[in-house]
Image (cartoon, rainbow, N blue to C red):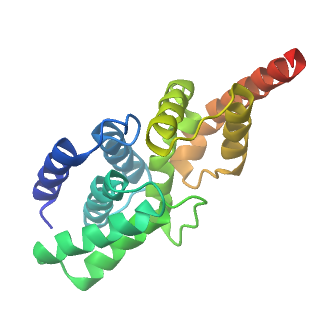
Amino acid sequence: MNIEAIKNHVIEYFSKNNPPENIYHNIDHVKEVVEMVKIIAAFENVSIKELELLTAAAWLHDIGHIKTWANHEELSANYAKNLLLACECSEEEIEVVLGCIRATKIPHKPNNLLEEIICDADVSHIGSTDFFKKSDLLKLELARRENKIFTDSDWINRNIQFIIETKIYTNYGTKNWEQQKQINLAKLRKQYSLLTKQN
């Protein structure tokens, strides 16, 4: 599997096709997921071959977002299948990559360690000090692309539910993100309490 070719293809495709409204789901997010997949995979001791498949999935997991928000994971999987077939990847390799891409659909339902790794990598911001910055970008993207406008209290409540419902699967994620995840959740609850008191 030629990861460099897949990487270059995805970067070029995003450069030419990603709408400017996608200020969260852009090539920066894809690159962050790729790097996080590598970090988690090293901690979880996956094989070189498994890392290769994971990396391919990470590069391709959000390519469907360029066309649509709804069910973009399936669109990404279909795109990935065609690309990997053209690259002469085996059926077994393709199935692993597609499984990882489909696993990123929320709510997460990973079936194995590789799928758990990419699920965690895709939402690593929940256990990061960058959570609120990323949340603001996502809110703006939804407004610009999907015409979904949220009040401050609705958006905070949505984020509270997202953090509560999003499970961290890997040992790496639990060790490195769980504490900050709880800090972020506490901040959100405080913000929500202050807003609802004002109203």
Viewer-nearest residue: 2 or 189: 189
Viewer-nearest residue: 79 or 35: 79
Residue shown at the point (69%, 40%) measured from the top left: 158
Residue 170's spot in the image, x, y percent?
A: 54, 53
Residue shown at the point (54%, 45%) measured from the top left: 173
For the C terminus, the quadrant is: top right
Residue shown at the point (62%, 30%) measured from the top left: 180
Q: Quadrant of residue 183?
A: top right
161 left or right, relative to 175: right
Residue 64's spot in the image, x, y percent?
A: 34, 59
Is residue 29 in sight in this rendering? yes
Residue 50's spot in the image, x, y percent?
A: 31, 66
Residue shown at the point (27%, 76%) measured from the top left: 94
Most extreme residue toward the front is: 147
Is residue 114 in sight in this rendering? no
Residue 3's spot in the image, x, y percent?
A: 16, 58
